[in-house]
């Protein structure tokens, strides 16, 4: 089951070039990295979101910003829309 992940775009003043979304299963230590254009606030990952950890960071000319607080979704849930909010 694929998962669509959305988040609020950072203000244009931050000049975000891309977003980096990382996700991993609870029983894994390595994160899977997904790079997304800075004009996009949505990505589809091929894995189910259930029981997974997510974190997000913005990247601009000065480099990658701080990671959002990691978010873990419960093992069982139906019809969840995940929104990660990052702040400048």
Image: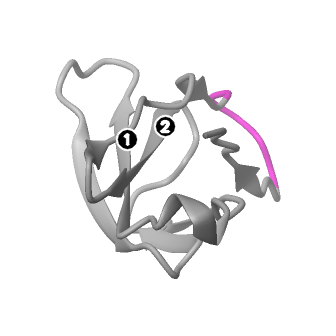
Q: Between residues 71 and 64, which one lies in front from this camera angle?
A: 64
Which residue is depicted at the point 53% across and 79% down?
A: 40
Q: Earlier in the sequence, mark 1 or mark 2?
A: 1
Q: Between residues 20 and 10, which one lies in front from this camera angle?
A: 10
Read off the residue under disc 2: 54
Magenta region, residue range? 74-78
Read off the residue under disc 1: 23
The 10 Å Cα crowd at callout 1, few under 14, some 14 to 19, many 20 or more, is many
> Mainly helix, strand or loop, the magenta region?
loop
The 10 Å Cα crowd at callout 2, few under 14, some 14 to 19, many 20 or more, is many
Q: Secondary structure at mark 1?
A: strand
Contact between marks 1 and 2 (CB within 8 A): the answer is yes
Percent from the top left, x then y, of residue 7?
67, 58
Tell me if residue 53 comes above or below residue 21 in the rendering.
Answer: above
Mark-to-mark CA distance, 1 and 2: 4 Å
Q: How is the image coloured?
A: one colour
Which residue is depicted at the point 47% across and 36% down?
A: 55
Percent from the top left, x then y, of residue 50?
58, 40
Image-based side of 58 in relation to 34, left or right: right
Percent from the top left, x then y, of residue 38?
44, 73
Which residue is depicted at the point 48% across and 37% down?
A: 54
Percent from the top left, x then y, of residue 72?
59, 26
Tag shown at residue 67: none
Tell me if residue 24 comes above or below residue 69 in the rendering.
Answer: below
Q: Between residues 30 and 21, which one lies in front from this camera angle?
A: 21
**Is residue 77 in the magenta section?**
yes
How many tags in the picture? 2
């Amino acid at each position: 089951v694929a998962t669509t992940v959305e988040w609020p775009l950072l203000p244009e003043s931050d000049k975000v070039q891309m977003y980096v979304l990382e996700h991993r299963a609870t029983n894994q230590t390595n994160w899977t990295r997904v790079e997304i254009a800075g004009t996009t606030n949505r990505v589809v990952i091929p894995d189910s979101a259930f029981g997974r950890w997510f974190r997000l960071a913005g990247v601009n000319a000065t480099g990658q910003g701080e990671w959002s607080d990691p978010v873990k979704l419960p093992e069982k849930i139906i019809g969840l829309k995940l929104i990660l909010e990052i702040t400048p």
